[in-house]
Image (cartoon, rainbow, N blue to C red):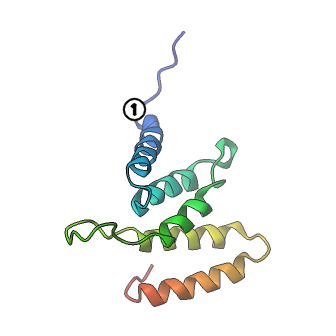
Amino acid sequence: MPVHRPKWSKAPIAAKTTAQEAIELDGDNLRAYLVLGINNYYTPELYGGKSKCEAYFKKAIALPDRTSENEFDPTWGKGDAFYFLLSYYKNRKDDGDQELFEKLKQDARNKFPDDKR
């Protein structure tokens, strides 16, 4: 007997697939790494959640805002990557996470002084 899944339950899979395809096309696309990180961040740990989000957010932060000289290319996403990585460190509470959190928070404030999140 087939199992019918609600349409909304397919969205995380589609987002992950699309982000992976975007990385294949442009490995420096920080927004694709952000999507993968958010997807993993919100996946329950029972299903592998929070296992890769730290690496995805760090990769997004390390990449340039834009990969071309086109002034109309998007530049958003790095502030969001900082936000989610900070949230990850704050909630994980492993040894050294508080120190990582404080260092990253200062870095984020220096780069995004107007972001009040």
Residue closest to the eye, 61 or 84: 61
Report helix, strand or loop for mark 1: helix
Determine whether, in the image, residue 40 is placed left or right of residue 17.
right
Say above or below: 7 vs 70.
above
Name the residue located 63 percent from the left edge and 85 percent from the top edge: 102
Q: Residue furthest right?
A: 95
Q: Residues within 10 Å of mark 1 (few under 14, many from 20)?
A: few
Which x, y percent locates residue 91?
66, 68
Q: Residue furthest front?
A: 69
Say above or below: 46 vs 76.
above
Name the residue located 43 percent from the left edge and 48 percent from the top edge: 19
Quarter occupied by the N terminus: top right
Name the residue located 39 percent from the left edge and 54 percent from the top edge: 26
Name the residue located 47 percent from the left edge and 39 percent from the top edge: 13
Say above or below: 32 vs 63.
above
Residue closest to the eye, 108 or 8: 108
| Number of numbered callouts drawn | 1
Residue closest to the eye, 5 or 99: 99
Q: Which residue is mark 1?
A: 7
Which x, y percent locates residue 58?
56, 68
Q: Quadrant of residue 47?
A: top right
Which x, y percent locates residue 117?
45, 78
Q: Quadrant of residue 52?
A: bottom right
Determine whether, in the image, residue 19 is placed left or right of residue 101.
left
The amino acid sitting under disc 1 is: Lys
Determine whether, in the image, residue 45 is placed left or right of residue 38.
right
Q: Quadrant of residue 30?
A: bottom left
Residue closest to the eye, 80 or 68: 68
Say above or below: 101 vs 81.
below
